[in-house]
Image (cartoon, grey):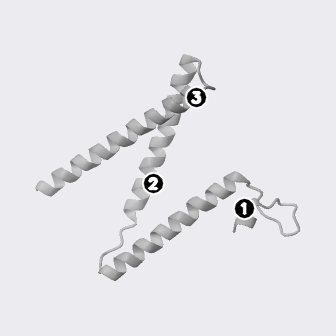
Amino acid sequence: MTYFTLAPGTAALPGLGLGAVGLALKMVVLNIVSVSLLAYIIARENGWKAEYVYQVVVFSVLFTLGWASKLLSREVLTTLRVMDSPVSVMVFGSILFGMVSLTLLAAFLEWQDSRTI
């Protein structure tokens, strides 16, 4: 699988020629498959219902928060004219951390409310 993502299309055994992006994509896909498989096995062993909707929701929320923080930090950094400096990484990380923290806090508070009913 690694060879297929890395090898150029002109090789004797052609691949996709994706380089580092291919390795990252392979890692994400294999992790999603392995987590889903393990969740299924654990749920089956314990007699639980496997709910894959949560995986899709969490992935979608985190991907959206990451994308939104990227856009927001790009706007902030362009306004401050410090786009290519170490400050940009700190701004992006701070915005992403804040968004994820607020989302987790909201989810926790909703979970707490559902337990009291």
Q: Residue at x 68, y 57 (%)?
A: 22
* Res 27 label: none
Could you tell which of marks 2 and 3 lies nearer the N-terminus? 2
Label 2: few (<14), some (14–19) or many (≥20) C-alpha neighbours in 10 Å: few
Q: Residue at x 61, y 26 (%)?
A: 85
Distance, label 3 to label 1, CA atoms, is 31 Å
Residue 34 picture location, percent across and down = 51, 70
Residue 14 picture location, percent across and down = 82, 66
- Could you say which quadrant of the image residue 88 lies in? top right
Q: Residue at x 25, y 49 (%)?
A: 108
Rendered position, 19 above or below 106: below
Q: Secondary structure at mark 3?
A: helix
The residue tagged 1 is 5
- Could you say which quadrant of the image residue 78 lies in? top right
Residue 97 picture location, percent across and down = 41, 38
The residue tagged 2 is 59
The residue tagged 3 is 86
Callouts 2 and 3 close, C-beta under 8 Å: no
